[in-house]
Amino acid sequence: MAEVKLLNLDHVAIAVHDLDAAVEAHRRRYGVEPLYREVVESQGVEEAMIPVGGSFIQLLQPLADDTPVGKFLARHGEGLHHVAYAVADIEAALEHLRSVGAKLVDETPRIGGRGARIAFVHPADMAGTLVELVELES
Ligand code: CO
């Protein structure tokens, strides 16, 4: 029986127009620094990952207007974009979610930042909140 095992709140993602400005704002307001920045072409974003305890704040700037995050910014403006849960086994998690009727964006995992396997669950499935599952390389 497939099941979901949530290991951690991996990150909270915030969509921004200007990644440099958002990184600097976090530095000045909260005294935090990105551990790394990465262009993830497959998702159409440049992301900065800022460690906070055992989790990250993920700042997302779209590479173009016609990307998912670009369209999100046009519709909603800057703000909370998704929450990401670390899972032990992403295939088992997706199988379980399908079995309970969850509305998936990704039927199979794809590769995200850090080389992690990720999949998104549709915001219509959970209180308007886009959820990302992340299986980190062990
Ligand atoms: Co994310």
Image: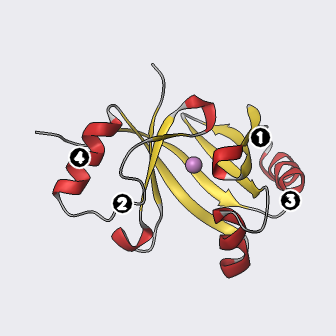
Vertical comparison of 64 with 96: above or below: below
Q: Label 2: how many residues lie within 10 Å, few (<14), some (14-19) or many (20+)?
A: some
Q: Would you name the residue on which mark 1 appears?
A: 32
Which residue in the rendered view is the most extreme toward the bottom? Answer: 75
> What residue is rendered at 61% in x and 41% in y?
56
Q: Is mark 3 within 8 Å of ligand 1?
A: no
Q: CA distance from mark 3 to mark 4?
A: 37 Å
Question: Which one is closest to the eye, mark 3 or mark 4?
Answer: 4
Is residue 73 visible in the rendered structure shown here?
A: yes
Residue 13 x, y percent position in the rendering: 61, 54
Q: Secondary structure at mark 2?
A: loop
Q: Would you name the residue on which mark 2 appears?
A: 104
Q: Earlier in the sequence, mark 3 or mark 4?
A: 3
> What residue is rendered at 66% in x and 48% in y?
58
Q: CA distance from mark 2 to mark 4?
A: 10 Å
Quarter assignment of residue 115: top right
Q: Earlier in the sequence, mark 1 or mark 4?
A: 1
Tell me the kind of residue under disc 2: Leu
Tell me the kind of residue under disc 4: Glu
Q: CA distance from mark 1 to mark 2?
A: 33 Å
Residue 105 x, y percent position in the rendering: 42, 60
Question: Which one is closest to the eye, mark 1 or mark 4?
Answer: 4
Q: Is mark 1 within 8 Å of ligand 1?
A: no
Quarter assignment of residue 73: bottom right
Numbered label attached to residue 18: 3
Question: Which one is closest to the eye, mark 1 or mark 2?
Answer: 2
Task: Give left or right: position of 1 versus 105.
Answer: left
Q: Label 1: how many residues lie within 10 Å, few (<14), some (14-19) or many (20+)?
A: some
Q: Would you name the residue on which mark 4 appears?
A: 95
